Amino acid sequence: MEYPYFLGLEIAMPLLHGPLLFLYTTLLTGKTISKLYRSLHFIPAIIVYIALSKFFLLPTPQKIYVYENNGIGYLGLLKIVHFAILPSGIAYILTSLYIIQEHRKNISNLVSHIEKINLNWLRYLIFGMCMIWVSILLGNDISTFSLVDVFILFIGYFGIKQVGIFTNKVTPLPVGNLDAPTPGDIKDIPFIANVKYQKSAIGQEFLSEIHSQVTRLMQQEKVFKDPELSLNELAEQLNIHPNTLSQVINTMENKNFYDYINDLRIEEFKLISIQPENQKFTLLAMAYEVGFNSKTSFNRNFKKKIGLSPTAYLKQQKIALQPININM
């Protein structure tokens, strides 16, 4: 009654929630989509607003009359919008969850620390959006608007807190003749599929040579101790293409980059924890020393590889480290 000029604008807004969630997710994951494809997602909402154009031109008293009589004269359109909202919301929520899952797989091949960029918080907020939809369908205005308020606060907080996503785009090199490079010219090896390596003796030879270089670098310089180590940085040190390095690690180690680096950190932890001179340090101090940047990441990766928590492992090995000072 106080702001009748806004009447009707809210009808198509639920059809904008899904597209905006989808675009926000693609933005955070570094996924590139064209402007045309981006615009297509807003067509349903635009169609609804066009269909409501006659309503928007009505005098204010008539607009209020329509609302006071449950949408009289527009019941058919309102039913169509109502039935379109639910599948739209479900489709975009599932699509956004899929993009986040693919993002998690991709960053595991690019960085050795995924905790701050895995977008788990966004996945939880998408589940929160599901609760909002359930409240819209089954609840009341109090529950719906309360959930929306909490959702906005959380997405604002986490959106600002979110660390920059690794967006260095790696362009695959063109597949060439494997007989062309000389054995010493490793930097020119093209990115090729596993099957290509398997069918070519020269391809296997180069792959093994790169793997040997990676292994030597890890053993001698222990670059895995850098908590921010990424695939691109390691490839730059080896003077090879990141795609080639990723292929080598996946093929020769049967692991992604994230698991490969963190497994090396765990092995280093096991090695230094048994040395008497290091038993004056805490478990967390040594976890940081080998390259982990959080206790949670260390515990999760350790248990995944060893099958025991770090504390249980040390107890089993009868290794006594300094207790963590909780007052620090």
Image (cartoon, rainbow, N blue to C red):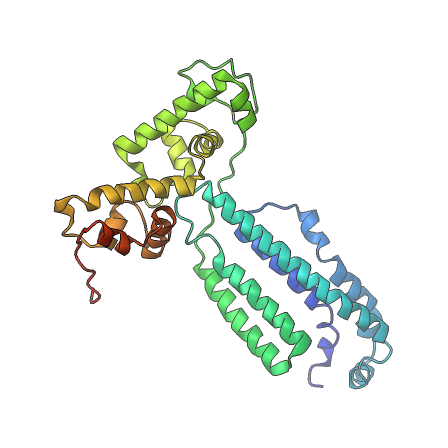
Q: Which quadrant of the rendered structure holds the C terminus?
A: bottom left
Indicate whether 308 appears above or below 59. above
**In front here: 30 or 313?**
313
Q: Residue at x 65, y 64 (%)?
A: 17
Q: Residue at x 57, y 55 (%)?
A: 25
Q: Where is residue 169 in the image (x, y as percent from the top left)?
A: 52, 39
Q: Which residue is drawn at 59% across and 67% down?
A: 129
| Residue at the right extreme, as displayed | 73
| Residue at the front extreme, as displayed | 316
From the viewer's perspective, tell me whether residue 53 is left or right of residue 113. right
**In front here: 251 or 328?**
251
**In front here: 116 or 307?**
307
From the viewer's perspective, tell me whether residue 266 is left or right of residue 153. left
Res. 214 visible in picture: yes
Q: Position of residue 137 (x, y in %)?
A: 68, 75
Q: How many labels does the image show?
A: 0
**In front here: 18 or 299?**
299
Q: Residue at x 39, y 31 (%)?
A: 236
Indicate whether 134 appears above or below 46. below
Res. 173 visible in picture: no
Q: Position of residue 147 (x, y in %)?
A: 56, 75
Q: Which quadrant of the rendered structure holds the N terminus?
A: bottom right
Indicate whether 65 appears above or below 277. below
Q: Position of residue 319 (x, y in %)?
A: 18, 51
